[in-house]
């Protein structure tokens, strides 16, 4: 199943013919009072929502995809986790290019560890990227994004995919400079996730997916997730050894070689096999 969020927080079922407005399926969600839970309520109740979507879909109106403003399909992740230099060729280019490393030591992911991005940086493709620090280089990074489906702590890699709710396309936008990654990658709109959530049952092997990005019609990055240093299961094991992962948490799995600058006015097309494509426009903040 492919679920999106569009317009004024409408829930959509993505079909070949368009997007069905199945917002009424959210009536199965529990109601909370303050203090609110530290997880995404829809993802935590995804099985119930999916069942309700199937019940109401036939009688729901369908909209053409064109013209719909797609938001992030995940509204409230407690955290977004990044995987730095998780492709060997990107590690090589980062170490060899001063515009990328800025005299920082670029360690392999096993030593560098993971990093956190502010949840406030999350947007959907229809919201676009609003660049800051235009006097510095801002780069695109296309990544497979993994959504955690249930509470996970100290999970072994061999069991990790059992904790995945689904997948999407992630853009990890980066301001280049000497500061810590978490600062330069947590700017508002610098985590793009979309165009929809593809539930885990539709992707048998997330570690063998083509991914690419075009900027203004020219391909910048093109690779396959089989080239990740740590695969999806290993990343979940790594992350859950340090953090409790909550339903709705997003893991950005790292980017391949070919990262490059973006500027206001650019148009991005990011694609991942079995998920689809999303178009994102770049502007100045």
Image (cartoon, rainbow, N blue to C red):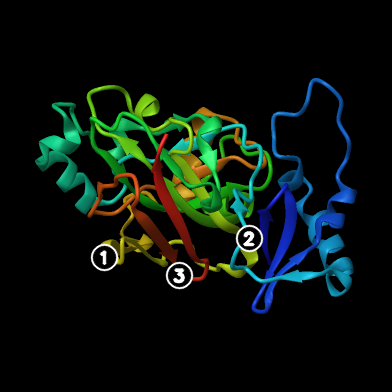
Q: Position of residue 28 (x, y in %)?
A: 89, 50
| Mark 3 to mark 2 CA distance (whole Å) | 22 Å
Residue at 60%, 58% in the rendered image: 196
Which quadrant would the C terminus be assigned to in this image? top left
Q: Earlier in the sequence, mark 3 or mark 2?
A: 2
For residue 224, which quarter of the picture? Answer: bottom left
Q: Earlier in the sequence, mark 1 or mark 3?
A: 1
Which quadrant would the N terminus be assigned to in this image? bottom right
| 136 relative to 231, above or below | above
Q: Residues within 10 Å of mark 3 (few under 14, many from 20)?
A: some
Disc ID at residue 218: 1
Q: Position of residue 207 (x, y in %)?
A: 43, 62
- In front: label 3 or label 2: 2
| Mark 1 to mark 2 CA distance (whole Å) | 25 Å
Q: Is residue 38 left or right of residue 138?
A: right
Disc ID at residue 68: 2
| Nearer to the camera, 91 or 284 | 284
| 228 relative to 119, above or below | below
Q: Residues within 10 Å of mark 1 (few under 14, many from 20)?
A: few
For residue 54, which quarter of the picture? Answer: bottom right
Disc ID at residue 86: none
Residue at 18%, 42% in the rendered image: 94
Residue at 16%, 47% in the rendered image: 93
What is the secondary structure assignment of the residue under circle 2? loop
What is the secondary structure assignment of the residue under circle 3? loop
Find disc 3 in the rendering and name its residue: 273
């Amino acid at each position: 199943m492919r679920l999106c969020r569009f317009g004024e927080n409408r829930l959509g079922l993505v079909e070949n013919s368009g997007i069905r407005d199945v917002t009424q399926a959210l009536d199965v969600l529990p109601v909370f009072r303050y203090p609110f839970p530290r997880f995404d309520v829809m993802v935590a109740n995804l099985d119930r929502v999916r069942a309700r979507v199937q019940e109401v879909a036939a009688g729901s109106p369908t909209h053409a995809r064109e013209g719909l403003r797609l938001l992030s399909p995940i509204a409230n992740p407690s955290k977004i986790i990044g995987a730095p230099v998780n492709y060997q060729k990107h590690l090589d280019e980062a170490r060899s290019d001063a515009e990328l490393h800025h005299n920082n030591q670029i360690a392999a992911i096993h030593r560098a560890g993971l990093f956190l991005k502010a949840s406030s940086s999350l947007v959907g493709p229809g919201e676009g990227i609003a660049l800051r620090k235009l006097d510095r280089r801002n780069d695109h990074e296309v990544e497979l994004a993994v959504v955690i489906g249930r509470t996970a702590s100290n999970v072994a890699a061999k069991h990790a995919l059992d904790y995945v709710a689904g997948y999407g396309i992630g853009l990890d936008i980066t301001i280049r400079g000497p500061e810590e990654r978490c600062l330069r990658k947590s700017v508002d709109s610098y985590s793009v996730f979309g165009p929809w959530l593809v539930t885990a049952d539709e992707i048998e092997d997330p570690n063998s997916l083509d991914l690419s990005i075009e900027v203004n019609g020219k391909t910048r990055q093109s690779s396959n997730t089989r080239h990740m240093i740590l695969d999806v299961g290993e990343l979940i094991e790594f992350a859950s050894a340090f953090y409790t992962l909550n339903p709705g948490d997003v893991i950005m799995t790292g980017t391949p070689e070919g990262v490059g600058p973006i500027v206001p006015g650019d148009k991005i097309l990011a694609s991942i096999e079995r998920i689809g494509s999303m178009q994102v426009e770049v502007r100045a903040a």
